[in-house]
Image: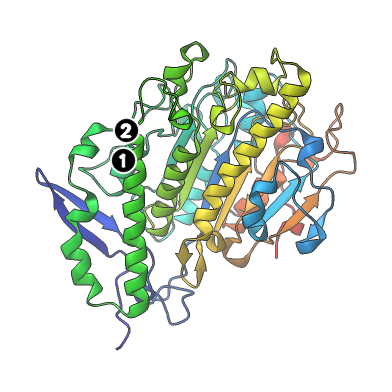
Amino acid sequence: MSRAVLPRRTVLRGMLAGGISVAIPLPRMAGMLNGNGTAYAAGAPLPLRYGTWFFGNGINPPEWVPAATGVGSAWTLSAPLMPLQPVKSYLQVITGLTNKIPPDPAHKGRPAAALTGANASGADVALPSIDQVLAPILNAGAMPALPGGLHVGISSTSGAGALDLRVSFRGPNASNPPQYDPAAVFKQLVMFGGSTTGTGGTSGPTGPDPELARRKRALDAVLDSAASLRARLGKADQLRLDQHLDGVHQIENQIAILSKMPTTPTTTNAKLVDPAMAYPNMGAVGSITKLRNSAMSDLIVFALATDITRVFSFMFTCSACHGNYADAGLDPVTFHEDYGHRKSPKGLAYATQGFATGVKYAMTNFNDTLTRMMNCSDGAGNLLDNSVVYSTSCTSESQTHSGNDYPVLVAGKAGGRLKTDQHLRMATAPPGTTGAPNGDNLSKVPYTLMTVLGRPEGPWGMGASQISTGIPELLT
């Protein structure tokens, strides 16, 4: 049987109850590619993607920094980074970097510098964020449905003076607020009645949309279209189609679970309790749970694999996040204060261990996102082979707000342009050294990534964060 050639933008179409049309995009299939799976059949190269994965409240540098540097078996992950072991072969840990922006306030200027290369300007940023610099470059010659990217978040419980609730910026006073509701993102991606992009960046999650539960499932609506397409495919693409539709089914099931989340605290479903309801005095607007992270990660993978977008930002927790990490087994209190600033009434040792647990929990969720990308095929490889994911935080050491040994992780191979499985240290001082800046400019990492993905060389950033050179050691 000859290989069926498919248009690269083939979709499955159907109709929901009430006359609402639905279209489920397809991932890259063999019929869309050349014989080697390295480019589209028409000759266009496979697209590259970029994502920012942000977590609030910083780290403890002496624990964070791996003991040895090098590549491959020469180094091992530190305890807080150990959850990333499944994706170590796609990871670069860069330590010894300094965020050059003064901590005034720490949770605004420093995350602004890590995301835009410049200090915050008043209540906002001065420059576009990395993802928005790259969006028009990565979209060149294509027309993704979401050209500016997919922007999602888990918790939006922020503290005063922080770079509130946003990690993606088109420029000053032009942010891309994250959507906190997986049901709304799902409806958007399968084109339920047009755009359902939320503006919950200032008000937080509104809860799963009950309308989704009343509608016929999206998969049911496109069964005839899927059967017709399947008959034209080779065996490999038939399997890929089945896996893709099974993934959509799993996403729908996850969202159905979220739609049944209790609105009042229970003793039998503690990990899914919304902290806004369970602990109203904490002011939480969104529960921090692995289930929500997994649901959002699946949606991001879906959007990338089907070329709905080539850029995303994932705000796991915002700058100075005051939400609780009860899902990690910690007390249902303000993580930023009780653990980050070690103010727990149970004592310093208890708070220090709790903070370490929280950082490890964040990395567990980061691993979940990366693993789902790694497990999604893309041409001859997978999404991480053709992506770059940059992860950072709003500060380094959580108590002092030090800018030294700033947390920076890079995942993905960028189509073979980036090294992987590497710990690179850019400072000679011991981890966690305070006082004068002890390391190279943090901005060099995003500069390197943007250059790899097509930004022309030249100055990037402003003030103390501005640079014109990258880090060659990150490149193949």
- Quadrant hosting residue 325: top right
Q: Is residue 184 above or below residue 45?
A: above
- Asked if marks 2 and 1 touch (Cβ < 8 Å), the reply is yes
- Compared to residue 131, the image places residue 310 above or below, namely below
- How far, Cα to Cα, is label 2 from label 1? 7 Å
Residue 200's place in the image compared with 98, above or below, is above
Q: Residue at x 47, y 46 (%)?
A: 312
Q: Extreme front residue here?
A: 268
- Secondary structure of the residue carrying tag 2 is loop
* Residue under pointer 2: 260
Q: 289 or 470, which lies in front?
A: 289
Asked if residue 118 shows in the view, the reply is: no
- Quarter-of-image position of residue 406: top right
Disc 2 residue crowd, few under 14, some 14–19, many 20+, Cα 10 Å: few
Secondary structure under the numbered disc 1 in the rendered image? helix
Q: Can you identify the residue that label 1 sits on?
A: 256
- Which quadrant of the figure contains the N terminus? bottom left
Left or right side of 220 for 167: right
Foreground: 182 or 303? 182
As drawn, 165 above or below 48: above
- Amino acid type, callout 1: Ala
